[in-house]
Image (cartoon, coloured by chain):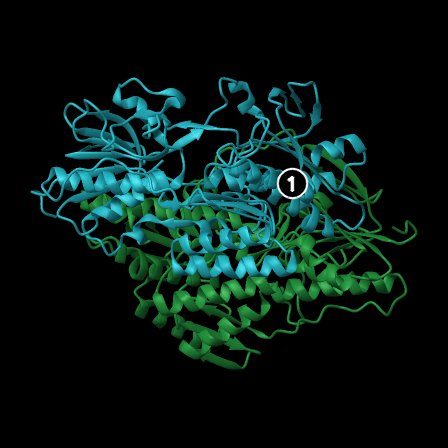
Chain colours: A green, B cyan
């Protein structure tokens, strides 16, 4: 290692951090990539892990493997607990001990966490879907309740066990609601021969429409496709109350359920608070158009955790392509500071967005122009996700599983894998 | 459901319980199959999950799926807590509540658990490899320690972190030691570019030889193959002391390590105690040659948890084929009690045994005659395990992974997936 080279620390191996690191690979800098996990998570497919279609490892790729050919990139498994921006060091919690790591440039890319918009009591009874562990927990929860439901004799109790409420009309909410509905009604209930165990899946959205950023026709198409699948959709009805055995909507509707999946919103990662700058709404860290943090020399931030307005005064959305492009730009602007090229402001290349709603149902809005729906949108979604999944072996396995699931309506990854305390020694 | 049919409860969905249930499928009986997990575990490949070669779901198959076409077999996810053999009922803990289930015939097939031969203090610092959760915990442990080791500067500390002690010279010990050695020295250390991070794997066996039941030439072949791979083998040296950062052997040898894998021995499942009969050595439940439990009318028991002597006065070994064949026999003898055929005593068809030691190394002893070693034994092992793995999709994925690993020396399933408390509601 050449100690003369500038040292760049990247915090977070999500899409933003990964693209920053890639842009710095084999450049004359030393990169330290820090994450709490030893893997990158392909978050768009978390709901497929939660609904038994994919294995956790099929959407998780070891960070070390991604950069194994790049000698200037090292990785550290740990959590950042402090940032000393005056002296340019950070504290990292590694296996029970704290390491201090110096930096010349810092790229923060720790994403977002769920927000309950002030109703933090909701959280106690909610299941989330932001991390791989969340997905495995949700899978365990759904499968355990279903196993119990098969043995419950009281109708009302059983119905509550097989009723799922998903909150949030964005892509995650739609995809999760659709996939859970299919899991229950096309897969699980085939194996419960002694009784009809169909389920209710209710999607609750506060606004009067789904998929807020989409054009009206696609919002409508998504709603129709969800309902044609069998999912109940409750629009314009915020949650009023969440208990362990029911939820109540603002209009008074009571739904008996033991499963509330929270996909209603996210806020910036709490790591932003370590910089002591005033945050924007949603806990997002304001950045300059170069992705730098003002008055914090050498500190850049990218992706969901940041707040930056476009030409029209709207903040860029908290989506993966923004994180990827900002991550790349942060890396390039750091190289520019070192004399390679010129610093550039952020320009978002928006290739559009898509959301899938179960088998053969989807909506896609490409380049803010082309609007697709139904089967063709679903095929586009499938192709895109196969292409972007990291790692050949993962892609092959995912493909095998998808083809298999498609033709057989099977979901093989149906194990309730409860983890004990975990006898991990000394390093804990 | 015809309530006139005799009701058979099978406890345990391991190899014994599964084969019993299969033999009762579509027969004029009602079968209830109870297990603590919703899946059957293909235990011979647990070590491959622990060493990042396979995903948990690739060796776990949902019990419901196995019997989905058999209307006379129901499954219950729960733990048996009491057996009232006088009134022929059992208590089952299901999601926090106790159910009482009546039976006409009971087949116990809950296998075995690790034993520390009276040295229960060893357990505190040992990792086991008997369940799927064990395998995931061991994987997390190994990967976490390795990540930390890459950042430790003190030589001695680092060496302790990358030293693995495996106790037990049976097939599990050999397979685990070999697979961990390959994982470290052929896979992980390729991605630690900044320092040589090779590992020590020490296999400790109390007896002066490995693979006790095998002929001498194969024992010797196994030892040579292990050593040629790079595993250190300590024969004739029982463990004296186990601490969190080292172990000591009886001859005084001290090995600094944070990883002790216990594969030294098993004893009968504690469920046997619920029958109030005197147990044999190793906590094994004595059974008659028909697999019935004496003086407990209608109660059968099979597999690892049982004790039955062969013609020469030796107890049958605690291995999968014995469990499978006893499970089948128990089912047939119950049908015989109902008037279908005649009750038969147990006759073990021993097709031999094999153990694998990493890539292209193995020993096989077929029909107690043919002795194979090396590459050909490994190919035989590979073929057998692919054939016996349940479920087409699993077999295909396992095959894809194996071919991929073989040619690339890659292990893709390298994620440290720590499970949190799990926000599972109400039913807990």
Q: Position of residue B326 (x, y in %)?
A: 29, 38
* Closer to us: A368 or A175: A175
Residue lying at the far right in this picture: please name it: A4
Q: Does residue B228 appear in this view?
A: yes
Task: For the C terminus of chain A, give its image quadrant.
Answer: top right
Q: Position of residue B97 (x, y in %)?
A: 28, 32
Which residue is at a point 64% across and 24% down the rendered structure image?
B244
Which residue is at a point 26% across and 58% down the rendered structure image?
A190
Q: Tell me if A308 is positioned left or right of B58 in this view.
A: right
On screen, A89 above or below A310? above
* Closer to us: B193 or B371: B371
Q: Chain of mark 1?
A: B
Which element is circle 1 on? helix
Disc 1 designates what residue?
B224
On screen, A218 above or below A287? below
Q: Tell me if A316 is positioned left or right of B313 in this view.
A: right
* Closer to us: A332 or B101: B101
* Closer to us: B239 or B367: B367
Q: Position of residue B76 (x, y in %)?
A: 27, 41
Which residue is at a point 60% across and 55% down the rendered structure image?
B412
């Amino acid at each position: 290692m050449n100690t003369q080279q500038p040292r760049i620390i990247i915090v977070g191996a999500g899409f933003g951090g990964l693209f920053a690191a890639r842009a710095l690979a084999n450049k004359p800098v030393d990169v330290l990539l820090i994450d709490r996990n030893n893997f990158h998570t392909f978050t768009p497919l978390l709901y497929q892990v939660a609904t038994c279609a994919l294995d956790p490892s099929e959407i998780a790729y070891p960070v070390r493997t991604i950069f194994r050919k790049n000698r200037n990139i090292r990785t550290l498994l740990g959590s950042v607990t402090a940032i000393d921006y005056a002296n340019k060091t950070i504290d990292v919690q590694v296996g029970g001990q704290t390491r201090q790591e110096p930096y010349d440039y810092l790229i923060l890319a720790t994403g977002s966490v769920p927000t309950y918009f002030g109703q933090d009591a909701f959280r106690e009874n909610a299941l989330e879907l932001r991390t791989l562990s969340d997905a495995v927990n949700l899978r365990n929860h759904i499968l355990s309740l279903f196993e119990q439901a098969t043995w419950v004799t009281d109708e009302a109790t059983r119905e509550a066990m097989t009723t799922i409420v998903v909150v949030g009309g964005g892509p995650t909410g739609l995809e999760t609601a659709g996939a859970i509905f299919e899991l229950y009604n096309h897969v699980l209930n085939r194996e419960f021969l002694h009784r009809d165990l169909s389920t209710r899946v209710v999607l609750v959205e506060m606004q009067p429409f789904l998929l807020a950023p989409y054009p009206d026709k696609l919002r409508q198409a998504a709603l129709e496709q969800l309902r044609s699948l069998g999912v109940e959709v409750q629009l314009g009805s915020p949650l009023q109350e969440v208990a362990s055995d029911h939820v109540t909507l603002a209009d008074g509707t009571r739904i008996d359920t033991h499963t509330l999946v929270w996909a209603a919103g996210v806020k910036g990662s709490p790591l932003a608070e370590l910089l002591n700058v005033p945050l924007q709404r949603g806990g997002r860290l304001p950045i300059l158009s170069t992705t730098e943090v003002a008055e914090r020399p050498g500190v850049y931030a990218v992706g969901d955790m940041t707040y930056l307005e476009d030409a029209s005064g709207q903040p860029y959305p908290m989506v993966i392509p923004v994180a990827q492009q900002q991550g790349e730009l942060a890396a390039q602007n750091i190289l520019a500071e070192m004399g390679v090229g010129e610093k550039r402001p952020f320009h978002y290349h928006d290739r559009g967005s898509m959301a899938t709603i179960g088998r053969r149902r989807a909506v896609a809005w490409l380049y803010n122009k082309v609007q697709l729906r139904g089967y063709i949108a679903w095929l586009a979604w499938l192709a895109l996700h196969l292409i972007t999944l990291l790692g050949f072996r993962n892609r092959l396995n995912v493909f095998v599983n998808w083809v298999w699931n498609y033709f057989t309506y099977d979901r093989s990854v149906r194990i309730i894998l409860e983890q004990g305390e975990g006898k991990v020694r000394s390093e804990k």
